[in-house]
Image: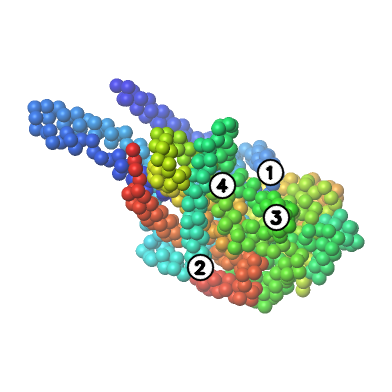
Amino acid sequence: MTTTTEPAVTTSQERQSRNPPGTEATKAMGGPGAQALRRRRRADALFSYAALTPAFIILLGFTVLPFLLSAWRSVRNPAGEFTSANYERMLNDGVFHQVISNQLVYTAVTVPATIAISLFLAVLGTKVVRGRSLARVSFLAPAVLPIVAAGTIWVYFYQPNFGVLNGIARAIGLSGVNWLGTSDTALGAMMVVAVWQQAGLFVIFYLAALLTQDPQLREAARVEGTRAWTFFRRVTWPLLMPTTLFIGVIATANSFKQVDLVFVMTQGGPSDSTNLMLYYVWQTAFGQFRQEYSAAITVMLVIILLLIAIAQIRLLDKRIHYR
Amino acid sequence: MKHSRLSLTASFAAIALTLTACGGDNGDDDVVSIDFYYPIAVGGPLESAMDGYIEQFNEEHEEYEVTPVYSGDYEQTLASVQSAAQAGNAPAATVLLSTDLRTLNEQDIITPIGEIVDDEDWFNSFDEPFMANSVLEDGTVGAIPFQRSTLVLYWNKELFEAAGLDPETPPETWDEMKDYGHQVMDSGADWGVMIPSSGTAIWQFEAVAIQMGLQLDSEDGTETYLDDPRAVEALENWVSLQDEGLEPQGIVDWGTVPDEFTSGTVGMVWTTTGQLTNISNSADFDFGVAPLPALEQPGSPTGGGNLYVTSGLPEEEQEAAVELIRFLSSPEIQADWTVESGYIAPLQEAWETEPLASYVEDFPEAAVARDQLPDAEREFSTYHRQEVGQFASSAVQSALTGEGEPQELLERAQQQADDALDEYR
């Protein structure tokens, strides 16, 4: 289930690298050396297919095939007849509606927030002169923590009675909040942890992109008297677009794959306010013994992911300048 | 050239690996080998204790070879067993939640143990409130109770004393519980009472409902009574703890309640007997354990696991599984397991067996759960138990977070439960 996002990513990469290098050569066919050339090309093609085979088998076996099996399963009832009952059930399942809306909020908030925060930290990071490696390690620290450990630590931060956050709040005279214990704040509290967890890794990507930008651009801008913000908006940001697309796709995938924090922090509660799609897939498949329904939700999940991936790539491709 | 040599080596390595992987199952022909999956849901180094029992079993039974597999918590174990069963490779014996009995039987994942052996004396040796979650509606014994627990009240004797209360007297009724709660808060405690409400809040809700004199589901598991006036009153009582400021607003987390209690700032908490060892290790003050307080009557639900035999086994593996279950549910093992884990031994004989007998003498708190048994009721276990339980838990949580009135929330949960259970009526 968790690997279902990969095809979208892979296809985008494939599409870009699939400009066939042989198009030029085709025109030259028919000359005296054409026979040898053709044989050579066939050998090359065979080798590249052979080289692709392991990856292809893994993709097929662990992503495409399970998805097709899920799709097949979702339209069959336990007696083996075809049925649309599992999809009709979705329409009337209040918990499922809540889960979808939680998921969309979660994705719509965590993805831009992750991009904004990691970019901000990366820009700060380029300005650090002393203790540069210390700064970078500290960015990465949350990302190398196991998610379960991170979630458990934050459960204690958020604890209303003796948690750190409410301790600070009380010290400055505010009344504490039961962060994970009220429906209004629980999802938000979990999103903070998710962003904190993954932003550090993306800082490294942005740092790498920022540090490879041509310093002449900045000098030219300084000569022309461009303001820093304009420079960032007109030069730095567009040049970072490939990195941003990459981070956006990964962060979106992560948001749909998020299940660990739900397990550790809230078990989907209070009142399903933090129940996300993958957790619900797990609940229906194993806890509720509704594997056909779970398969149908998985199909929905994949469809949503494919749509988002296509939209992301279509929209952003136009605005990206690859060098 | 280099390519082909590399790929040749790689293929040999792959074939060799595959062969090694296939080789493991060919043991001796006259020894029956089975797997046993077990979850652990409380803290402590319990794997080694369980592995020790299995080692002892293997030594005593030359004809059987049991491999113990620690499989995470109950949820993960259920998932492992389901996946293994679909792959035709289910463990012969396993521990799963007692409340999943109906569904496991309906899905044909287990064979009711009463269909394999007919041993009334053995079945009758277990306590009735525990056995109630191990018997199918037609009276067949489906499984054997194992690592059971129940809800009890823990109270902080130091806070009671500071408030001028008798530190040795726990509350016997809700009125007393609220009164004592207010008194300990007046003398400096942060909170009076905490009843956890995260996750599967249905268990705690059941406790209050039983105290109102109501079992939330029917014996045959096809009906729920979530909108019964007594259920509504039970939930209103629970919410009143927040309204009176005795309990923090919103959800009280199940996982951190023991820490809240041992931090010494809460007068009383409700939690499982399974936390007794943990709490007594971390509390640096005197505390007591008592049966839950009464509303109309005292009462508490039981909880925990069953030992199951899976379905579709060859006869000799089935026998091995039953023999293992007999061994694990014997008073000797149960006495030891109760001391090690804090779970309640589900048969009286175990309490008179060492090491449990002398343990209870030194540490009488451990016996409170057993003493509460006459008032204990079976656990909520309808068909689609997890789904229906979640509707009820959500209603409880919505009431506690102020998203609605108990009456309408429980009516909606009842409606949802009716829809889910309709196919069984």
Distance CA(mark 2)–CA(mark 4): 31 Å
Distance CA(mark 3)–CA(mark 4): 20 Å
Structural crowding at the residue carrying mark 2, measured as other residues with C-alpha within 10 Å and reported as few (<14), some (14–19) or many (≥20): few
Q: Which mark is residue A94?
A: 2
Query: Which residue is the site of mark 4?
Result: A196
Q: Which amino acid type is shown beneath numbered disc 4?
A: Trp
Which of the two discs, 3 and 2, sits closer to the camera?
A: 3
- Pointer 1 chain: B
Q: Is residue B181 left or right of residue B6?
A: right
The residue at 30%/44% (across/down) is: A15
Instruction: Residue B72: give x, y in percent of width and height.
Output: 60, 47
Which of the two discs, 1 and 3, sits closer to the camera?
A: 3
Distance CA(mark 4)–CA(mark 1): 34 Å
Residue A254 visible in the shown view: no
> Secondary structure under badge 2?
helix
Find the residue positioned furthest to the top: B1
Residue B56 position by quadrant: top right
Query: Which residue is the site of mark 1?
Result: B46
Query: Which residue is the site of mark 3?
Result: A169
Q: Which amino acid type is shown beneath numbered disc 1?
A: Leu
Which of the two discs, 2 and 4, sits closer to the camera?
A: 4
- Pointer 3 chain: A
Residue B186 position by quadrant: bottom right
The residue at 41%/59% (across/down) is: A300
Residue B164 visible in the shown view: yes
Instruction: Residue B184: give x, y in percent of width and height.
Output: 84, 61
